[in-house]
Image: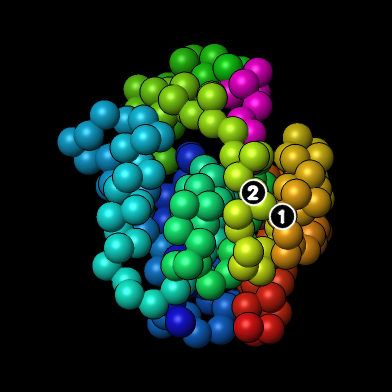
């Protein structure tokens, strides 16, 4: 079994390293760089998803997906469109419907941030803004019932902005459970990688 971990916007793959050290079967865990998938392509969600679809196509067997925020949206989208290829799913701080006002506020903040900050993210300033803007109309709520695999919905206890959406996601998915990560905000993989790894191990070990 292969496991694919998808980082959030504003993160690099290295954000998963401490979590992976805790997880079982670490040689089978992949955590690709999402920014590389948009190399020489227009920075928009559609292109990012198509690149992920192509990346996933190299594997024949069903895989386990785990994503945080943007990574969670990609994982959720893929599980809706290719449910036969997803063995199980873990979604962290993930919203099924994009909060437009939050994204608009985020982009306002992005615009005043220095370019040097974005270099640490993997995406340049314009790419981050354009990608965020392209996601505003995403809404997967009507398709959640198509996901039949086991799903673990996770949220940091300090991530008040995403907690209601995470709980709603758990209720809407046919075979989902919810768990909170203590002492963590939105970036659970950075704030409490130990507890995150332990919860993922427990969930994935149940088949």
Residue 125, image x, y percentages: 37, 25
Residue drawn at 53 percent across, 52 percent down: 80
Residue 116, image x, y percentages: 38, 30
Q: Is residue 58 left or right of residue 15?
A: left
Q: Would you identify the image quadrant in which residue 190 lies?
A: bottom right
Is residue 97 one of those drawn in magenta?
yes
Helix or strand or loop: what does disc 1 sit on? loop
Is residue 20 one of those drawn in magenta?
no
Of the pair 173 and 51, the residue shown nearer to us: 173
Residue 22 lies, with reference to residue 99, above or below; the image says below
Let me know if residue 176 appears in the view. yes
Q: Which mark is residue 3?
A: none
Residue identifier under label 2: 144
Residue identifier under label 1: 173
Q: Quadrant of the C terminus?
A: bottom right
Residue 38 lies, with reference to residue 117, above or below; the image says below
* Label 2 crowd bin: few (<14), some (14–19), many (20+), radius 10 Å: some
Q: Is residue 4 left or right of residue 204?
A: left
Q: CA distance from mark 2 to mark 1?
A: 6 Å
Residue drawn at 50 percent across, 48 percent down: 77
CB contact under 8 Å: marks 2 and 1: yes
Q: Would you identify the image quadrant in which residue 149 lies?
A: bottom right
Of the pair 152 and 109, the residue shown nearer to us: 152
Residue drawn at 57 percent across, 78 percent down: 23
Q: Which residues are magenta?
A: 96-103
């Amino acid at each position: 079994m292969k496991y694919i971990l998808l980082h959030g916007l504003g993160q690099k793959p290295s954000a998963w390293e401490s979590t992976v050290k805790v997880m079982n079967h670490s040689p089978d865990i992949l955590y690709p760089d999402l920014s590389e998938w948009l190399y020489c392509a227009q920075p928009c969600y559609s292109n990012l998803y198509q690149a992920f679809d192509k990346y996933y196509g190299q594997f024949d067997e069903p895989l386990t997906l785990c994503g945080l925020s943007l990574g969670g949206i990609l994982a959720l989208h893929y599980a809706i469109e290719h449910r036969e290829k997803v063995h199980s799913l873990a979604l962290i701080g993930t919203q099924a419907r994009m909060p437009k006002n939050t994204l608009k506020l985020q982009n306002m903040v992005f615009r005043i941030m220095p370019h040097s900050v974005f270099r640490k993210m993997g995406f340049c300033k314009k790419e981050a803004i354009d990608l965020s803007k392209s996601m505003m109309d995403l809404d997967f709520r009507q398709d959640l019932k198509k996901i039949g695999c086991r799903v673990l919905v996770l949220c940091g206890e300090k991530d008040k902005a995403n907690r209601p959406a995470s709980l709603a996601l758990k209720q809407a998915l046919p075979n989902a459970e919810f768990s909170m990560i203590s002492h963590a905000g939105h970036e659970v993989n950075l704030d409490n990688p130990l507890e995150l790894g332990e919860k993922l191990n427990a969930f994935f070990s149940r088949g």
